[in-house]
C-alpha cells in the first residue's frame, strides 16, 4: 500500500516537471481517458499535472476544450485574492533528487540549444539536417584531435535522414504500411498483430481510429509495463495476455523498421562518410582510445556503415557485450572470440539493443550478424540457441527457454535495463562518457522517456568536457550565421 502511494507520488512529481509541450502530449491520452464531469475538467487537469489554474486554462484552450467563460473569470478572480493552495505545497526538496532536474547546468544549456523534446521530434530534426553533418565532417576531416577523446551520441534524428522513422512517427508508420506488402514479407504475422494493437487502442484505451497516428509509443507501453510489473490486469486484459500484447507491438515495430529500411540508400550516404571518417582515425591510430559511439537507435545504419569500411578484417566493431556469430560459419565474425592487438576496434554502444542481435534467454549470449535485421526472426523463425541445444539435451524440449529473442528496449517510462548484457553496455557507456573530453550530439533530442540516459549524462560528463550539438543553422537563433552548423559550447 505504502509502496503504491510512493509510486503514485513519484508519477505525480514526474508530471509536475513536464514542460508544456510534454504535458500537451500526455494530455491527449489523459483527455481520452477522462470520464469525470465536464465542468470539473479544468480542475482535474490542473490537479493531475500539478499546475496552476491559469496554466490549466491556457493548456485546455490549446487543446480546444471549451471552458465556460464565466466559470473561468470567477476562478481567476478568486485566485487573484488567494493563490492556489496547490501551488503552496511545493515539493522542492524532493524535486532535487529527481533525475531530470539533476542535469548539470551544462546539459541544461544543451537542452536549451536543442529545442524541447517534442518540438525537435516534430519539426526540427529532419533529413535536411544532415547535409550539414556531411559538410562539417568533410571540412574537418584532417583535424581530429586525438588527445580529445570524443564520444558521439546518436539519436533518432541521425537515422531519420536515411528513412528510419522518428519515435513519434512509429505508430502512424505501423498503421500506414500496405497490408498486402507486409503480407508478402511476413505472411499473416503482421496483419494479426496489427489487428491486436488496433483492438487494444480502440477498446481498452478508447482512442478513435482516426487518432491512432497521434498517439505516442510511451503512452501505449507505459500503462502495459506498469501492469506487467505490478502483476495487475489492465481492464479486461490479464497480465499474461498483456505480455503477449507487448510482444506483438514490439514485433510490429521491428517489422516496420526492417521493411522501411530494406534495401534503402545503396549510395554513399552521410552515414558512410561519417563511418569512413571514424574508421580512418582508428585505423591510423590503433592504440589510442580516441573515440566511441553511443547510439539509442535500434536500426543498424551506423553499424553497417562502419562494417562496410572495415576491409580484410583489419578491424572489429566492439559492442561491449558477449557476442557470438549468428551464422555458425560466419568466419568474418570469429574475431569476436579472440583478442587481436593488430586490429583496430570501434566501440558502438547500443543502449537500447540492436536489430542485428538476438539473445538466448537461457545463457544470455548475444548472436549477431551485419547487414541483416535478424531481430524480426524472433517472430518468424523462432530459432534456438545452438550452444544451449548442444549443452543441454532438454533445452529445446522445454522450448522457449533457449529460444532466441530480440530484446529491444522500447520507449517507455519503465524500461527494464536489468539484463546482464544491457548492464554491461550501460556501464561501458558510463565509463566512456566520464573519460570523454568532447561529446557530440547528433540527432539526439533528449526524449522525455529517455530519462535513464539523461541521468547517465548528468552523472558522468566531465566538468570540462566540450559539448557540441549538430544542428541545422535554423535550430538556434544565436547561431544564425551561414555555415555554422555546429554550435560550439564551452
Ligand atoms: Zn543459449
Image (cartoon, rainbow, N blue to C red):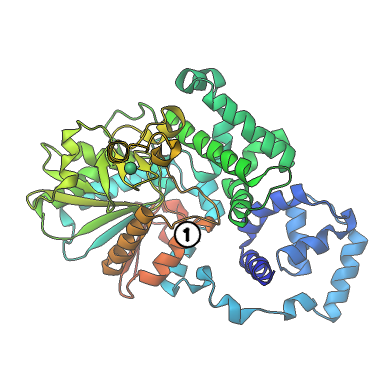
Quadrant assignment, res 241 = top right
Q: Is residue 384 above or below residue 410?
A: above
Q: Is residue 421 left or right of residue 56?
A: left
Foreground residue among 20 and 113: 20
Q: Is any atom of residue 207 visible in this view? A: no
Residue positioned 43% across, 46% down in the render: 157
Query: What residue does disc 1 label?
Result: 477
What is the number of callouts on the image?
Answer: 1
User: x%, y% of residue 48?
Assistant: 73, 63
In which quadrant of the rendered image does the C terminus lie? bottom left
Q: Is mark 1 within 8 Å of ligand 1?
A: no
- Residue that protrudes farthest toward the left in the picture: 342
Kind of element beneath mark 1: helix
How far from the left and from the top, in percent, is residue 6? 65, 71
Q: Nearer the viewer, residue 274 or 249?
A: 249
> In the rendered view, would you say 58 is above or below 296?
below
Q: Position of residue 114 (x, y in %)?
A: 46, 58
Percent position of residue 394, x then y: 37, 37
Q: Residue at x 87, y 60 (%)?
A: 40
Residue 326 visible, this orientation: yes
Query: What residue is drawn where x is 91% and y is 63%?
Result: 71
Vertical placement of residue 455 versus 359, above or below: below
Q: Residue furthest right?
A: 70
**Residue at the outermost front position:** 393
Callout 1 crowding tier (Cα within 10 Å): few <14, some 14–19, many ≥20:
few
Looking at the rendering, in which quadrant would you find the N terminus? bottom right
Q: Nearer the viewer, residue 34 or 65?
A: 34
- Which quarter is ligand 1 in? top left
Amino acid at each position: 500500500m505504502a509502496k503504491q502511494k510512493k509510486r503514485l507520488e513519484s508519477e505525480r512529481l514526474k508530471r509536475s516537471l513536464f514542460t508544456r509541450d510534454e504535458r500537451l502530449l500526455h494530455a491527449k491520452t489523459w483527455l481520452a481517458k477522462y470520464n469525470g464531469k465536464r465542468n470539473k475538467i479544468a480542475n482535474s487537469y490542473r490537479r493531475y499535472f500539478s499546475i496552476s489554474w491559469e496554466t490549466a486554462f491556457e493548456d485546455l484552450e490549446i487543446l480546444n476544450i471549451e471552458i465556460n467563460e464565466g466559470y473561468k473569470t470567477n476562478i481567476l478572480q478568486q485566485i487573484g485574492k488567494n493563490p492556489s493552495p496547490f501551488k503552496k505545497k511545493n515539493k522542492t526538496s524532493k524535486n532535487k533528487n529527481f533525475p531530470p532536474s539533476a542535469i548539470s547546468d551544462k546539459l541544461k544549456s544543451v537542452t536549451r540549444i536543442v529545442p524541447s523534446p517534442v518540438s525537435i521530434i516534430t519539426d526540427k530534426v529532419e533529413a535536411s539536417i544532415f547535409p550539414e553533418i556531411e559538410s562539417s565532417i568533410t571540412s574537418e576531416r584532417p583535424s581530429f584531435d586525438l588527445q580529445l577523446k570524443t564520444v558521439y551520441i546518436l539519436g533518432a534524428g541521425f537515422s531519420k535522414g536515411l528513412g528510419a522513422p522518428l519515435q513519434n512517427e512509429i505508430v502512424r508508420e505501423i498503421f500506414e504500411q500496405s497490408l498486402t506488402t507486409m503480407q508478402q514479407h511476413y505472411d499473416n504475422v503482421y496483419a494479426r498483430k496489427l489487428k491486436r494493437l488496433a483492438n487494444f487502442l480502440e477498446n481498452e484505451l478508447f482512442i478513435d481510429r482516426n487518432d491512432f497516428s497521434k498517439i505516442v509509443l510511451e503512452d501505449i507501453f507505459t500503462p502495459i509495463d506498469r501492469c506487467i510489473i505490478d502483476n495487475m490486469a489492465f481492464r479486461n486484459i490479464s497480465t499474461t495476455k498483456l505480455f503477449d500484447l507487448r510482444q506483438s507491438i514490439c514485433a510490429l515495430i521491428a517489422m516496420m523498421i526492417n521493411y522501411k529500411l530494406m534495401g534503402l540508400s545503396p549510395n554513399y550516404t552521410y552515414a558512410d562518410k561519417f563511418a569512413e571518417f571514424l574508421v580512418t582515425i582508428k585505423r591510423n591510430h590503433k592504440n589510442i582510445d580516441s573515440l566511441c559511439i553511443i547510439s539509442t537507435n535500434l536500426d543498424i545504419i551506423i553499424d553497417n556503415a562502419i562494417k562496410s569500411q572495415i576491409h580484410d578484417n583489419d578491424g572489429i566493431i566492439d559492442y561491449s557485450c558477449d557476442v557470438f556469430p549468428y551464422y555458425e560459419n560466419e568466419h568474418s565474425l570469429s574475431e569476436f572470440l579472440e583478442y587481436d592487438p593488430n586490429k583496430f576496434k570501434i566501440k558502438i554502444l547500443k543502449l537500447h539493443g540492436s536489430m542485428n542481435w538476438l539473445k538466448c534467454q537461457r545463457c544470455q549470449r548475444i548472436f549477431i550478424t551485419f547487414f541483416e535485421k535478424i531481430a524480426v526472426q524472433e517472430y518468424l523463425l523462432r530459432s534456438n540457441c545452438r550452444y544451449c541445444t548442444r549443452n543441454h539435451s532438454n533445452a529445446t524440449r522445454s522450448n522457449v527457454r533457449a529460444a532466441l529473442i530480440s530484446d529491444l528496449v522500447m520507449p517507455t517510462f519503465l524500461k527494464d535495463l536489468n539484463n546482464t548484457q544491457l548492464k554491461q553496455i550501460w556501464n561501458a557507456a558510463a565509463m566512456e562518457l566520464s573519460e570523454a573530453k568532447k561529446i557530440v550530439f547528433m540527432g539526439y533530442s533528449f526524449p522525455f522517456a529517455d530519462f535513464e540516459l539523461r541521468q547517465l549524462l548528468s552523472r558522468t560528463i566531465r566538468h570540462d568536457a566540450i559539448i557540441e550539438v549538430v544542428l541545422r543553422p535554423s535550430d538556434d537563433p544565436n547561431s544564425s550565421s551561414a555555415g555554422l552548423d555546429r554550435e560550439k559550447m564551452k
